């Protein structure tokens, strides 16, 4: 009984274990990543985008299974990482770029492979992003009426059709939600996008192109990685559709837009209105206008110069989204009137942005006030009609008299002044003239201007224009010659005229003669300077700079000068000996050479010979000199004090050019120099070894040839017999020569191809590794190889790393995988293709797989796809089947055992 019970318990436990649902033991998702990664959110500045892997396989992956890498794509291949979280907030720096999301499994997750998604070009606003998204959506619309297209899997060898799947277009859902539209905002990274065929034709982006190089298209087809589905047994199941592999066409090229707007500050109608101002525009404050670049490219503005306004030029390029505030102000000197201008900024790109500026300038009213006009004694007469406004009298005209009725008269026609003696300080005579209004109305009098005569009021004050004379009234004016007239006869016509009508005038002629004055004969000569001295002479001095003395005849008679002389000074020759009144002559004076220590005084007399033969001293100039003992001073200086010969690479063929050094004796005693020397520097010969005070000599220095790598610093000393010296510091650096890193094309290789071969249901994955691709700090001249394209039957190109691809072949046979590598050379700033290429090949075999009934895998967008329903449990049930078999065996064993025992 105990054995039976024990066996019963064992069998019960094993049966219970085998019947436990596999989901109890369900493991974390594992296997290679597949499906489609998307980016959720609009590609606009300020928007938060996130990773959406709802259609990523295996199912039920979580945030903890991945690491995230957000990058900004600034060129075709240049990526800059900007974030490592599941979400990323788009910044202003991302404007105009695309964002790339890389999804990589964490270590130990059981997942392999990577997925990549890319946004559309980042726009400035969400509205612009929606517009770009709509354009992309329109480009991906299918041509069928219901937006779907059917695809059939190729027939197998026995003529049976494995499966027929219907593929629904992404826009069939009709939803505008950003999550459902992510396929429109992202780009699937496909390794064979944009490939070119060997015959030069362009393949449709994302669609491998078939060739007919001895193959049967009905039996053989290469699928891209997006078209491959791998079942639980590792067999490849194609979806029979090429739609995912055939993108709706190449992406539209990035469109460059050039746009700008102008906004007037504090103005709803966008007009710079300066209002109404007086003719003086200096106090008018400037207004400001904001210019904004609303395009996606920089704008370069041209200089402008409007006729009636001054504006600020935009001298710097205006980047996309940026704004600049510019001032505008009316030009000075605008005539009275109204100005309404359209100010237009133009760019080198052909864009114009305009705004309106207006101002009204008022003129000054020069008309006389009505209350200042005297009423006419004549009775008021009706004014005659004028043909138009231009003939009507102005506001300044008298209301009671016409211009034709004005008349002026003077009491005399001439003013004859007595003769004046030259050099007078004030005219000794004043004459009067009386101006009478003989017309019918008040006259505004304009005072005449003269270069020779002054017109004054009766009280002696200055007469000014604008004085009004009523009908019949008179005004007296005083006239006198102006001060300072020189010898000669002067005449001028003084015209008193009406300001209302210049033809209404009265004139008088004024005349005066200026005679030469009798002068007393004065003989005088002025010396400049009257004294000079040399107080800082040292014994043994060199001849100092001479002093120039100027003699001026300040009298009114001609003088004949004698040559001056002195005891302790050398006197130069007079520049002139005969001087007319006002003329000048000069001579020089300098201490004689060789004066000993002491004080020296001289009186230099300036004299002439009189008519009686006597010597008349006109002036005396005091001259002195002081000579002191000299203390010997020894001092040397060098220029420059430091020399830097820069840097050179080890093995330099020529040493740097020699540089010159100047040595100067700054003491007061002669010095004898010794030749300098250097260890690592070659020193030239001194141009002179004996230097008097103030004298200089030169020599040259240059680094020696063949110096090894290192830094060389020395002090080159220039000394002399008097134990004084000067030094110049020299420096030179030799850098170790850098050898260019030249990658060996033999290191180009293809990895991942199994030597065991594949079946017609295998997914074949490989990686191309270019020699020198690990050179992260390239230098000029470095060489590397970058994978360019690969070919089995079709030719497919890579656009960027990683250089990995996957494919499947449905026909058995032996094939060759060929990878072409571009040779690139670093030019100091970037890698450049040299035009040379290298190829590597690897052979592999394909065997016919055992025919199985394919279980269609649900497609990412297959709303109507015919496939088996998945529960989400990917647990391997093989162990549970084995346990169930063992339990069944135990039951059979017990039954047999009992029968035998009976």
Image (spheres, helix red, strand yellow):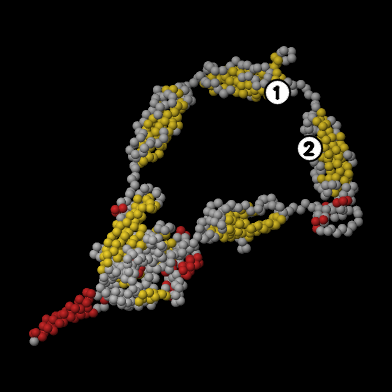
Between residue 521 and residue 748, name the one nearer to us: 748
Q: At which x and y percent is residue 853?
A: 28, 76
Q: Is residue 68 visible?
A: no
Q: Secondary structure at mark 1?
A: strand
Residue at (58% x, 59% y) in the render: 353
Q: Secondary structure at mark 2?
A: loop
Q: Quadrant of residue 345?
A: bottom right
Determine crowd level at label 2: few under 14, some 14-19, many 20+ residues with C-alpha closer than 10 A: few
Residue at (45% x, 22% y) in the render: 670
Residue at (78% x, 32% y) in the render: 485
Q: Quadrant of residue 85?
A: bottom left
Q: Quadrant of residue 843?
A: bottom left
Between residue 754 and residue 401, name the one nearer to us: 754
Q: Is residue 587 visible?
A: yes
Residue under numbered circle 1: 553
227 sits to left or right of 625 = left
Residue under numbered circle 2: 451
Quadrant assignment for the N terminus: bottom left
């Amino acid at each position: 009984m105990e054995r039976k019970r024990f066996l019963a318990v064992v069998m019960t436990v094993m049966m219970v274990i085998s019947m436990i649902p596999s989901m109890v033991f369900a493991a974390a998702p594992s296997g290679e990543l597949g499906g489609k990664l998307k980016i959720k959110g609009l590609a606009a500045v300020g928007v938060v985008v996130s990773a959406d892997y709802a259609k990523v396989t295996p199912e039920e992956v979580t945030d903890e299974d991945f690491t995230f890498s957000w990058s900004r794509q600034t060129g075709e291949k240049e990526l800059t990482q900007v974030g490592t979280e599941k979400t990323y907030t788009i910044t202003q720096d991302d404007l105009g770029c695309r964002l790339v999301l890389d999804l990589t499994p964490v270590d130990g997750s059981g997942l392999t492979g990577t997925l990549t998604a890319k946004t559309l070009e980042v726009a400035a606003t969400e509205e612009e992003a929606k517009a770009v998204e709509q354009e992309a959506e329109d480009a991906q619309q299918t041509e069928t009426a219901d937006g779907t297209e059917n695809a059939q899997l190729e027939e197998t060898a026995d003529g049976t059709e494995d499966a027929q799947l219907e593929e629904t277009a992404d826009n069939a859902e009709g939803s505008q939600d950003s999550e459902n539209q992510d396929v429109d905002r992202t780009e699937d990274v496909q390794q064979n996008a944009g490939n070119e065929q060997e015959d030069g034709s362009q393949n449709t982006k994302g669609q491998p192109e078939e060739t007919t190089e001895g193959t049967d298209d009905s039996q053989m087809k290469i699928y891209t990685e997006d078209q491959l589905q791998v079942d639980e047994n590792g067999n490849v199941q194609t979806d029979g559709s090429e739609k995912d592999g055939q993108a709706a066409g190449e992406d539209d090229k990035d469109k460059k837009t050039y746009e700008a707007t102008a906004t007037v500050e504090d103005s709803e109608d966008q007009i710079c209105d300066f209002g109404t101002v007086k003719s003086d525009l200096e106090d008018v404050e400037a207004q400001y206008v904001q210019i904004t670049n609303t395009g996606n490219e920089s704008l370069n503005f041209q200089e402008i110069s409007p006729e009636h306004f001054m504006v600020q030029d935009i001298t710097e390029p205006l980047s996309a989204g940026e704004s600049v505030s510019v001032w505008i102000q009316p030009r000075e000197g605008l005539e009275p009137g109204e100005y309404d201008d359209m100010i237009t900024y133009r760019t080198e790109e052909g864009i114009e942005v305009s705004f309106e500026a207006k101002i009204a300038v008022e003129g000054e009213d020069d008309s006389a006030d009505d209350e200042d006009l005297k009423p006419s004694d004549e009775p008021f007469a009706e004014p005659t009609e004028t043909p138009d406004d231009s003939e009507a009298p102005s506001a300044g005209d008298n209301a009671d008299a016409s211009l034709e009725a004005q008349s002026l008269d003077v009491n005399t026609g001439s003013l004859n002044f007595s003769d004046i003696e030259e050099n007078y300080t004030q005219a000794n005579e004043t004459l009067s003239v009386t101006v009478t209004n003989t017309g019918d109305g008040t006259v505004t009098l304009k005072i005449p201007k003269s270069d020779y005569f002054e017109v004054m009021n009766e009280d002696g004050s200055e007469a000014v224009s604008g004085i009004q004379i009523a009908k019949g009234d008179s005004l007296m004016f005083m006239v006198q010659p102006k001060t300072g007239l020189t010898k000669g006869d002067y005449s001028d016509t003084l015209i008193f005229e009406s300001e209302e009508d210049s033809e209404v005038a009265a004139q008088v002629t004024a005349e005066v003669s200026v005679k030469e004055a009798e002068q007393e004969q004065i003989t005088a000569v002025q010396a400049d300077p009257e004294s000079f001295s040399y107080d800082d002479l040292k014994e043994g001095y060199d001849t100092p700079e001479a002093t120039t003395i100027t003699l001026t005849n300040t009298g009114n008679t001609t003088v004949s000068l004698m040559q001056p002389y002195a005891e302790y000074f050398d006197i130069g020759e007079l520049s002139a000996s005969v001087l007319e009144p006002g003329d000048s002559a000069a001579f020089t004076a300098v201490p004689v050479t060789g004066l000993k220590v002491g004080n020296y005084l001289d009186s230099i007399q300036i004299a002439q010979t009189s008519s009686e033969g006597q010597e008349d001293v006109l002036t005396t100039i005091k001259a002195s000199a002081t000579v002191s003992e000299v203390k010997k001073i020894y001092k040397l200086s060098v220029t420059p004090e430091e020399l830097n010969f820069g840097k050179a690479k080890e093995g330099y063929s020529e040493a740097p050019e020699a540089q010159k050094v100047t040595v100067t004796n700054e003491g007061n005693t002669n010095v004898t120099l010794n030749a300098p020397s250097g260890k690592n520097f070659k020193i030239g010969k001194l141009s002179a070894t004996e230097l008097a005070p103030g004298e200089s000599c030169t020599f040259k220095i240059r680094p020696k040839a063949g110096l090894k790598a290192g830094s060389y610093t020395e002090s080159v000393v220039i000394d002399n017999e008097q134990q004084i010296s000067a030094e110049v510091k020299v420096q030179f650096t030799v850098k170790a020569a850098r050898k260019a890193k030249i990658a060996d094309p033999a290191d180009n290789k293809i990895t991942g191809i199994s030597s065991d071969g594949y079946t017609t249901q295998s997914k074949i994955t490989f990686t191309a590794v270019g020699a020198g691709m690990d050179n992260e700090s390239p230098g000029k001249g470095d060489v590397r190889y970058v994978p360019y394209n690969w070919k089995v039957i079709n030719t497919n190109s890579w656009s960027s790393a990683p250089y990995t691809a996957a494919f499947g072949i449905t026909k058995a046979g032996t094939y060759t995988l060929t990878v072409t590598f571009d040779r690139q050379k670093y030019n100091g700033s970037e890698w450049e293709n040299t035009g040379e290429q290298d190829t590597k090949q690897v052979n592999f075999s394909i065997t016919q797989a055992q025919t199985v009934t394919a279980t269609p895998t649900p497609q990412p967008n297959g709303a109507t796809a015919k496939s088996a329903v998945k529960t989400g449990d990917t647990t391997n049930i093989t162990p549970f089947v084995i346990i169930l078999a063992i339990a069944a065996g135990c039951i059979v064993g017990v039954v047999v055992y009992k029968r035998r025992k009976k």
